[in-house]
Image (cartoon, rainbow, N blue to C red):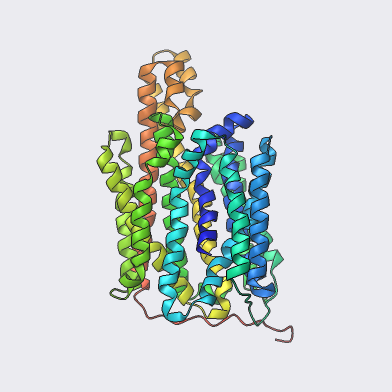
Amino acid sequence: MSLAQGMILLDVTIVDVALPSIQRGLHMSAARLEWVVSAYALALAALIPLGGALGDRFGRRKCFMVGMAVFTVGSAGCALSTVDVGLIAFRAVQGVGGAVMSALTLSILVEATPEEKRPSAIGTWAAIAGVGFMVGPLVGGLLLSGFGWSSVFWVNVPLGVGGLGLTLWAVTESKDPSGRHLDPLGALLASLGLFLVTFGLVESADRGWAAAVVLGSLAAGVVVLAGFFWWQHRTPTPMVPPAMLRQHRFATGNVVLLVAFLALTGMFFFVTLYFQNVLGWSALRTGVSWIALGVPFLVVAQSSGKVTRRVSPGVAVAVGCAVAAAGIVGLSFLSDGLPVVAVEACYVGIAVGFGLLSPVASAVVMSSVEGAASGIASGILNTSRQIGTSVGLAVLGSIGVTVAVRQWHAALDGLASPADRAAGSAWSTEVASGQTTAVAHRLGPSAAGWAVQAFGDGLQVALLVGAGFLLAGGVLAFVVLRRPARPVPHPAVRSPQV
């Protein structure tokens, strides 16, 4: 289960370093390229709760294996794609399979582990999964140094086949004895609402916040999500039982994971752009630079169970959030010539912080419910992480692009010639993504300096906002998670008579 979750999260970040190669190979526009990431993350976020319900009802091992088979087929389809629409579609297929897998890894693990050993088991699960997330750029860089972009998808095929064999050998079947029914309307509303909100946030970077399509998409997304939560209070078998969300420890653990992965994904996105587009690093060098993240994360995550025997989960999560936020704040000064030693120190801080907060918050969530509801709880937990990844990246990306473009236009105002200002304004998109070499070639070295500064300003503001979210999550955890745990009973299925 740990290896499967690691494979799912590996695919979130391994694609990042391959995006320029994919864009060149399939002649993709910037908007289409962004959906290569978003199609996968949104399918995960929207369908994980449904995957948990499927496993609880029809058997967790059986549904897990179906999900792994779909994920493997989707990976092969991505690798074989020759047009951008095909790649985006198969990325969504990957997300569907990954959603079912991700929803069930933790519930299968909890069912198979004695209660006194669960914190250590969850620590191992979080450590291996987190390492998969963090070494994705390194693995992608290694593959791209010798093969084409399709290699980042082919790597999932043998992993998927091996995972199916391991599951047949090692996992016993389990299900929810109450046989809860599915909630297809809830799944539809959640998927549509998250898509509309993410679409509006992504489009705001190109069209501006005042654009009708942006405002309309955001407003419609909020209305649909409101309808989703209304429906969860009305249906007898909700995807997200309201009783769980009213449990403060359960809700707090999920909020912490959401804001944590929001900050982490934003950091990956902007720092990778800075290294490759501004400094001209190769994909391999960029991936190697993340090594300082993997080892400290693994060590700390494995020890998180011992930490919580000495201090409360609230203190552990708060300290983890603060240390990780400090590392991200440090990286926000990249454009000011941050020394390599300082960069590595920031990586270590982020790794230590996430190695502490992620497994402890996950353990809090899973200990807040009774065992029969572990599938639902696991699904909601992983949904929180993926919403942080998809919607959070859209939020921080929009902030970074808005600041960079504003700073670029302010610099252009100093040009005397209207023609020069118009020419520079046409390169706003390239500046916002850090493509300063192209700007220098077209507009000259002085303009390139302005572009570097503008992109650096956007990077700094976006990372500081992400760190602020992390700190807020730490404060919430410190206040709430010191209270004693009272597990939420399994949501009973109400009969039509009731």
Percent of width and height locating residue 30: 57, 33
Specify whether 131 is left or right of 35.
left
Specify whether 3 is left or right of 496.
left
Residue nearer the viewer, 297 or 170: 170
Percent of width and height locating residue 460: 35, 40
Quadrant for the C terminus in the image: bottom right
Q: Is residue 140 visible?
A: yes
Q: In this view, which residue lies farthest toward the right?
A: 496
Residue drawn at the location 59% of the way across and 44% of the way down:
153
- The part of the image, by quadrant, that contains residue 65 is bottom right
In the rendered image, the vertical position of residue 334 relative to residue 424, given as above or below: below
Percent of width and height locating residue 359: 41, 65
Residue drawn at the location 34% of the way across and 70% of the way down:
314
- The part of the image, by quadrant, that contains residue 452 is top left
Q: Can residue 226 be seen in this view?
A: no
Callout count: 0
Residue nearer the viewer, 44 or 149: 149
Residue drawn at the location 69% of the way across and 69% of the way down:
183
Specify whether 496 is left or right of 368.
right
Residue drawn at the location 35% of the way across and 30% of the way down:
453
Percent of width and height locating residue 98: 60, 57
